[in-house]
Amino acid sequence: PSRGNNTNLQSRLQGPEELKITFDKGLICVERCLFPYILEYKDPLRLLSTSGADWDFQEAPDLREILKRSLTRFFYAYKKGNREKKSSPLFTIMGGAGIGKSRLLMELPQIARSVVDNDELKKRLDDALIFNISFENGTNYVPDIDKNPLIAIGIRMLWQLRPKSDMDFTEFQGYKKHHLNPNVILKRIAHSRHQKISDLTVFLLLDGVHRLMEHSDNGLDKDSKFYSCLSQVANLIITSEPFMIGCCSATSMKPMRDILARSRQLRIQLPIPQLKAPSRFHKPVFDMEKPLVKILVGDMGGNGRALEALEQVIPSNFDDRCISDIVHQLLMELEDLYSDIFDNADSYKELLRVILSNTPLSINCPVPGTNLRPDQFAEMGLICFEAEKNSAFGRLTCPYVWLWLMARAVNDPILLNWRFDDYDEIQHLHNPEKVSLGAQLWQNFERFAADFRVLKSGIYKERVELSIHTIHPGSAFDSRIDNDIYLKSRPLKLVYSSDRISTKSNSIAFIIHENGTINATDGQHLIINGEGAPAGDIFCYITEKTSTGQERNITEVLQVKKLDRKTNISLNTYLEERHKAAGKNDIFLLITTGKTRINSSQLPARSGIVHQKNWKEYFGPFSDRAFIYANVEPPDINTASRCWLSDIEGIGNKYADIIIKKRPYQSLEDCHQKTGIALKILKQCNCIINRSNNNDGFTEAIR
């Protein structure tokens, strides 16, 4: 054709971004642009590719009710044309790293479809377009390119719709033709589906929005990209013709209302639960019948990333004998996973101090001794800030495995002396050889309580004044004025007394132990009393600063008392225990597995109690460990594995098979009648017949 005809053809063919015409040596080349005027919708990309991405989803108990109520109201307002901030919600998902924010974002459309009961809304949700937009994990936020938040979202929407090509995201992001507003993209999709754009329903799901934050207070700065992004998404929800459901996830321990400047915009934060032992296709990921596996899973603290790491290192044919190798491999996996946050060892020693002492903290102020706020520590992953209700104050907590990682990071000899790697010991607790189960466990708990006190003695600088409420946190001691006691801190060494001795401060002098004799009044030792002593179980001399400014030596006495978990310890029993163990000026703390109706204000001065209700508050990250040592549950005869049953003295492989074959049992007597196994042997087990009545965290069982 002639050159004139070429020009004519060019003007006729070149529509709005449909075709690109080039002329090369008189030949007409027609090639489709990367994204034509008509766009075909494609299913979203997964936000997760980790090993836990296919675990069965676990949702918070109130999630469905929140979504049902919010979406029903929103759709009603949308249909009425009531498009304003108060009626058009922006959903948010906030929390620390690795807790399941991205997974909830991915599951949101399916959950939304299942909860609504309005037929029209349900049909729209069934046909909804879903866009998974991530500002990390391969489609990272780039400040120099992603200057306009809506264009940044549009680029990632087009990335989802792209045809297969070898182009990576960085190259894709650089093309100006890909810098489109989300509304333009949705119009083109509607055109391809022969729909009105107002007939579209869209889930716009943004992951990793915190990547747009340059400073922690950007949410309060309306000129920041972070605030601008959320503001523009909210405006898009209100003004766009489709029915658009928007949700943003961000790593932050503060709720959205606290990190964003005030606005009339309706923001609804969706809850995330702490993960329980995961399952895949309704089959357990971990063999929870094995005691050590159950403990390992508990040590991960319900954190998704930690549980994924555990799945990577624990073999399907788990053998108790290789537990130490598995645990150390797990630690290396987690250290690699969180390698970028273990640089400042000094900060982590301070962090350990506030966790172990259960120190109240303000979410708005740096943790003492560091330059990071509690929520900034919590954003890193396994650490959690538990806020008091309707308050800016709370406490930092963390799972057992994170304590171990921090202790390794700070490389402090006192912290490393704690027996973190106690899995072999716990394994032995479940399979005692010579000592009866109950006796052995309680002796181990005495040692655990003593080790715990020694550990806390080493996290403070020497001879610093500490309140009794700092050393023994929570509600162990009443806060009245005569418990306003200040002691001089000092690292303690643990020794065992060879004799049964009085633990009152006016009775103690020199103590004989396995390596010689010590002067107990030197304040350098924590002493475990001789077995069966008619006094305290554990004690030490401490220096108290009196109200007149003088110093005096007194004893701090710990008494551990095992009670049936249904039994209440009375005030009279408590007073008897105190009278035999401590003098008037001495400090006395009773630790019991039982219940109590005692109000701490009823106790004498300088007296405290740890019981079922404040157990977790007192032991913090060690509470599960403390309970294991204090009262490991014997196996449930109705659910225990063959391996566990066969290790019990008198049962063995033969009787284990019989027990399993003739399950279930209503009681140990029922088991005795069905199997012929002696009750004396069976009493080493529990027979749990109703788990649903367990409201206080302590298993109901018949023995």
Image (cartoon, rainbow, N blue to C red):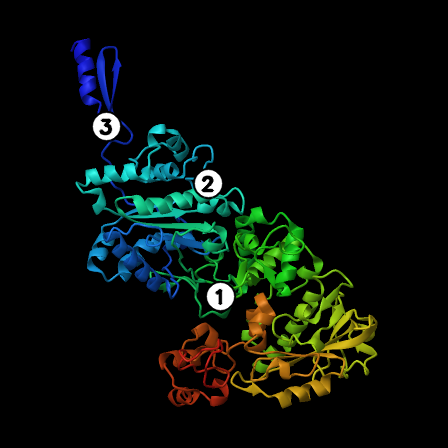
The residue to which callout 1 is attached is 293
Residue type, numbered disc 2: Lys
- Horizontal and vertical percent for residue 634? 50, 79
Residue type, numbered disc 3: Glu
Among the 4 quarters of the image, the one containing residue 640: bottom left
Instruction: Tell me if label 1 and label 2 are in contact, CB under 8 Å.
Output: no
Among the 4 quarters of the image, the one containing residue 392: bottom right
Under circle 3, the secondary element is: loop
Disc 3 to disc 1, C-alpha distance: 59 Å
| Residue drawn at 66 percent across, 69 percent down | 452
Disc 2 to disc 3, C-alpha distance: 33 Å
Instruction: Give whichever of discs 1 and 2 has the lower sequence position.
Output: 2
Residue 534 visible at all: no
Instruction: Tell me if label 3 and label 1 are in contact, CB under 8 Å.
Output: no
Residue 84 visible at all: yes
- Which disc number belongs to residue 141? none
Q: Is residue 203 left or right of residue 4?
A: right
The residue to which callout 2 is attached is 225
The residue to which callout 3 is attached is 18
Residue type, numbered disc 1: Val
